[in-house]
Amino acid sequence: MSKQDYYILLGIQKGASADEIKKAYRKKAKELHPDRNSDNPKAEEQFKEVNEAHEILKDAEKRAAYDRFGHAAFEGGGPRGGHPGGNGDFSSAFSDVFDDLFGDFMGGQRGGGRPRATRGSDLRYNLRVSLEEAFEGLQKTIEVPTSVACTECSGTGAESGAEPVTCPTCSGMGKVRAQQGFFTVERTCPTCQGAGQMINNPCKSCSGAGRIDKDRSLSVNIPAGVETGTRIRLAGEGEAGLRGGPSGDLYIFIEVKEHALFQRDGVNLYCHVPVSIGTAALGGDIEVPTIDGGRSRVKVPAGSQSGRQMRLRAKGIPALRGSGTGDMFIELAVETPVNLTTRQKEIMREFEDVAAENNPKGSSFFSKVKTFWAG
């Protein structure tokens, strides 16, 4: 059976450029790929023919031979050492079209090209701040151990003036293939570790890594209102990239220390304030601290019990996102006196004898107890 002209098969002119041949091949290969044409028994054979045409026309030497002698140039053991369309080449053809169709999406490289730059890793820094600092916000300088681009080689890893060379093992692809029957297994090149290039004259400062370990001083703005778990992102302040790649990011995780006087719940603060029995019973004024370092006078109503709360508006923590400030809640704790003198004990007994009817909660409780026992 006569073979169809390779140029006609791909739908291109005889003087087509390498890019035009590649584009035409990709288009045809997608149309005729067996996986897309399971209902067409001729698709596999047509796919082989398209791949055969591409194998010849993409190679300048084979293309010149084809232009001069036609299909006869490859009969009986031509430049490829066998018939271009033989079954022994189908698995290789399948691998080639897979690489051509999807290699760009998987980060594939062509021999001799610049190795693919790799973004640096993101870093995490845990920062503890006081509640006062979380309330006010602050500018803080931190020391971050990280990898930075080598200044001697500008991150290339090569000695000044030296140029990386294409890896001889993978021809710059950064990957090597091993044929296993119908399938082709692709692995990272063991010689260049996927870089596609090698450095024969590495930089003495970084030993060819392109990065050096160094502690960096960074000034960080901590906004008012942060709380434990708040994350602050500093773009480009992470680990330096490989082979000129961009740096990663630095993430600062905030932890707010516990305070001796205040407990925090979101934007609100709580302060437990002890008061004497006399103040709780008769009422009076007390002075309480506020988170800004000031003080506020609070009126305690007569007859206050332990657990009673009073609110100081806008004396809490400013909202991190949005506007407004939380409140501060004063919670009273009526304190029982200890270490009484003889005279004080006598006064308390006298008070106990006459004040039974002034304890409504106690009277109610014991009334319920009597009913319970009687029942």
Image (spheres, rainbow, N blue to C red):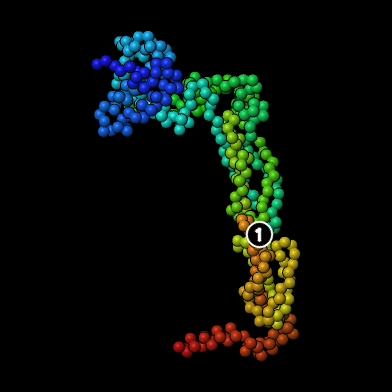
Residue drawn at x 63%, y 87% as measured from the top left: 358
Residue drawn at x 49%, y 19% as measured from the top left: 168
Residue drawn at x 42%, y 25% as measured from the top left: 23
The answer to whether 199 appears left or right of 317 in the picture is: left
The answer to whether 97 appears left or right of 252 in the picture is: left
The answer to whether 282 appears left or right of 103 in the picture is: right
Residue drawn at x 59%, y 53% as measured from the top left: 229
Q: Residue 266 appears at what percent x and percent y? A: 60, 61
Residue 61: quarter of image:
top left
Q: Residue 209 versus residue 40: which sits nearer the camera?
A: 40
Q: Is residue 49 visible?
A: yes
Residue that sits furthest to the front in the current view: 13
> Which image quarter holds the C terminus?
bottom left
Q: Residue 137 appears at what percent x and percent y? A: 69, 54
Looking at the image, is 134 positioned above or below residue 172? below
Residue 148: quarter of image:
top right
Residue beneath disc 1 = 318
Amino acid residing under circle 1? Pro
> Which image quarter holds the N terminus?
top left
Residue that sits furthest to the top in the current view: 68
Looking at the image, is 129 positioned above or below residue 369? above
Residue 317: quarter of image:
bottom right
Dot 1 crowding, Cα within 10 Å, few <14, some 14–19, many 20+: many
Dot 1: what SS?
loop
